[in-house]
Image: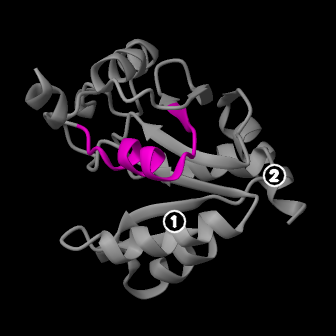
Amino acid sequence: MRLRPVIARTVLRATRWRLVGEVPERGILVGAPHTSNWDWVAMILIAWSNGVQPQVLIKQSFFKGPVGTLLRATGGIPLDRANPGATIRALLKEAESHDSFLLVIAAEGTRSKGEYWKPGFYRISQQTGLPVTLGFVDGPTRTLGMGPTFQPSGDLVADMNRVREFYSDKQGIRPENRTEPRLREEDDSR
């Protein structure tokens, strides 16, 4: 839809947020730091500004009433955290059959401060060969956008060191809720 980039750029200008980087048409977009419900709006604005319609995994409980209709209309995919397999398998099948496929995942899995990120973005990339792009929201600088894109090497610690380095100066909208990029599997592999 050609109107979406115009809407997104207008909202960003009006709210004085600066957009950097280009959104790929295909891959897994990590949305971090995930510290506020506004992060969803930020990721949609990033994608729409670049003319891309993302699919965004969102906790199933948010899909009640009119908010659910809005979430679905903007690419929201309800995720049952207790049983995510069926949703992920359907998305992976869709990724195989479309040239343009962008899946947005908030790797922190929560807007609250946590101990670990969820490994779904990494696992899905390894299973599908889709590249990972690091998207970000940084409240203190009022900047949002895209960082590097990479293909996981299989060396989890090295890949996550790369992720940590990129996000080291990104604070999110509510910096006190930021979770350091770290996967539980990193501790297990040592």
Q: Secondary structure at mark 2?
A: loop
x, y percent for residue 94:
60, 71
Identify the residue at image location x=34%, y=23%: 155
The amino acid type, in three-letter code, at marker 2 is: Gly
Does residue 113 appear left or right of residue 136 in this picture?
left
**Is residue 156 inside the magenta stretch?**
no
Q: Nearer the viewer, residue 123 or 18?
A: 123
- Using the image, determine if residue 20 lies above or below residue 70: above
Indicate which label's residue lies in the foreground, 2 or 1: 1
Label 2 sits on residue = 51
Q: Are marks 2 and 1 in contact (CB under 8 Å)?
A: no
Q: Considering depth in this image, is 160 or 165 the residue closer to the camera?
A: 160
Of residues 57 and 171, the one drawn nearer to the viewer in this rendering: 57
| Residue underneath mark 1 | 92
127 in the magenta segment: yes
SS class, disc 1: helix
Q: How is the image coloured?
A: one colour
Q: Quadrant of the N terminus?
A: bottom right
Name which of mark 2 and mark 1 comes first in the sequence: 2
The residue positioned 41% from the left and 30% from the top of the image is 172
Task: Give the quadrant of the C terminus.
Answer: top left
* Residue 178 as seen in the image, left or right of residue 131: left
Which residue is most to the bottom?
Answer: 65
Q: Quadrant of residue 52?
A: bottom right
Cα distance in 3D space between marks 2 and 1: 22 Å
> Going by the image, does 89 lie left or right of 99?
left
Question: Quadrant location of residue 70?
Answer: bottom right
Circle 1 residues within 10 Å: few <14, some 14–19, many ≥20: some
| Magenta stretch, residue numbers | 117-136
Please tell me which residue is depicted at 23% across the width and 28% down the height of the picture. 182
Residue 112, percent from left and from top: 21, 43
